[in-house]
């Protein structure tokens, strides 16, 4: 009996960045990425303006790292596909620094 083989397709990793970019470069991004960048920019503005905890210093730095992945997975057994899956995955890492530099 031949064992099942499991093949994973390596996901395409995208990193959305808020580093200064020309308007032309932003137009080349897919609509989904532009909407994610827009939402994160708004959240960064709101966080820097409104994020306060009583008795603690204001934040001097707020960063977000966004990882958008598209994953495709196919499993084969005896020359045929017995499982396949495709989907998107998004993870956001946030860092907030308070006090002085």
Image (cartoon, rainbow, N blue to C red):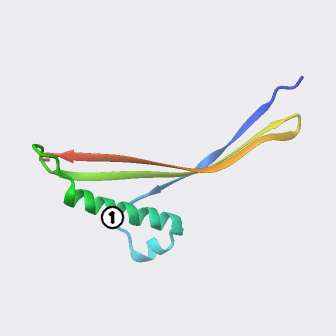
Q: Residue furthest front?
A: 54
Left or right for 80, reference 59:
right
Quadrant of the rendered structure where residue 80 is?
top right
Name the residue that disc number 1 marks: 42
Q: Quadrant of the N terminus?
A: top right
* Residue 15 seen in this snapshot: yes
Image spot of residue 12 (x, y percent): 59, 52
In the rendered view, tell whether residue 24 sits above or below residue 81: below
* Residue 19 seen in this snapshot: no
Q: Residue furthest top?
A: 1
Q: Residue at x 45, y 72 (%)?
A: 25
Q: Residue at x 20, y 58 (%)?
A: 50
**Image label count:** 1
In the rendered view, tell whether residue 44 sits above or below residue 7: below
Image spot of residue 100 (x, y percent): 12, 47
Left or right for 6, reference 47:
right
Image spot of residue 61 (x, y percent): 23, 52
Label 1: state its secondary structure: helix
């Amino acid at each position: 009996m031949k064992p099942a083989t499991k093949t994973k397709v390596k996901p395409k990793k995208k990193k959305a960045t808020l580093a200064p970019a020309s308007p032309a470069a932003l137009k080349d991004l897919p609509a989904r990425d532009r909407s994610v960048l827009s939402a994160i920019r708004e959240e960064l503005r709101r966080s820097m303006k409104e994020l306060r905890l009583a008795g603690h210093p204001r934040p001097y730095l707020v960063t977000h790292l966004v990882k958008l992945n598209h994953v495709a997975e196919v499993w084969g057994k005896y020359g045929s596909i017995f499982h396949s899956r495709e989907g998107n995955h998004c993870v956001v890492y946030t860092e907030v620094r308070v006090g002085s530099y």
